[in-house]
Image (spheres, rainbow, N blue to C red):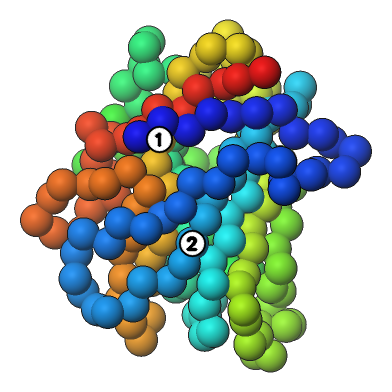
Amino acid sequence: MKYLIYPLSLTNHNWESIPVAFVEHFPWKTSEYYPKTKAQLAYSKEGIHVRLESYESQIVALYERLNDPVCKDSCMEFFFNPNPDHDDRYLNFEMNPIGTLHVGLGIGRHDRRHLDEVDPSVFQIKTSVTKESLKDYQGPSWILEYMIPFAWLEQYYGRIPFGEGHRMKGNFYKCGDKTIHPHFGCWNPVENLTPDFHRPEFFGELIFHS
C-alpha cells in the first residue's frame, strides 16, 4: 500500500486536509475486538508529524517510563524506515494513551536496541488522555500527536534528502497484548502465522508530496 505525506501548516495544524490511513487488517484472530483506528502523517520544515486516533470505550495505560512494554497496554504504533534505499534499519515508535514512549532501532526484532538515551520531550508528544483523566475516560476515542524532528533522525541515519518524491517505508499498528480483548491490527497487511509487527518486508510506501 502507498501513503502520500503532505505538508502540515504549523499555524493551525489542519489535519482535516491530510489523508487518512486506516488500521483495518486484523490477520490474527486473537479476539473479535477490532477498534477503528486511523493514522495520519504530514511534514514541516522541522520534521515528520504523526497523528493517531483509536475509537475505544475502554483503555488501559499502566506503564509510565521510557521503553516500558507499552504494547501490553492499549497502544498505537508507527514503525518506519526513513531512508530504505540506503539503510535497512527501522524505528519503532510505540505509545500508550498517556503518551509513554517505547522506541527502538534496528534491522529486525532480534537485531535492535532500545534508544534509552532519548529525551521524549524532543517529540512534543500531545495526548487526549492524561494520567489524571484516565480513570474518567469514556471515549469515544483517544488521540496521540507527536513530531519526529529531521535533525533527530540525522543523528542515527545521517543526512536524508527529505522532500518531494522522497520514499520512506513503514506501517501503522494497533494492539493491546494484555488488555481484556487482545488485538493486533495493521495498515499494510502482514503475512505471518503469529502476531509480529517487526516484519519490515511488509512495510508500505510513505512518499513525500508537495
Q: Choose between 52 and 99: the one closer to the eye.
A: 52
The residue wearing badge 2 is: 37
Q: Amino acid at mark 2?
A: Thr
Element marked by disc 1:
strand
User: Badges 2 and 1: C-beta atoms under 8 Å apart?
Assistant: no
Residue displayed at 62% across by 13% down: 163
Residue 170 marker: 1
The number of numbered badges drawn on the structure is 2
Q: Choose between 63 and 88: the one closer to the eye.
A: 88
Element marked by disc 2:
strand
Image-based side of 39 in relation to 32, left or right: right
The answer to whether residue 120 is visible is no
- x and y percent of residue 162 in the render? 60, 15
Image-based side of 171 in relation to 11, left or right: left
Residue displayed at 43% across by 48% down: 172
Q: Amino acid at mark 1?
A: Gly
Image position of 77 with respect to 69: above or below: above
- x and y percent of residue 140 in the render? 62, 79
The answer to whether residue 199 is visible is yes
On the rendered image, what quadrant is the N terminus found in? top left
Image position of 36 with respect to 40: above or below: below
Dividing the picture into quadrants, the one containing residue 198 is top left
Dividing the picture into quadrants, the one containing residue 5 is top right
How far apart marks 2 and 1 lie (CA) works out to 16 Å
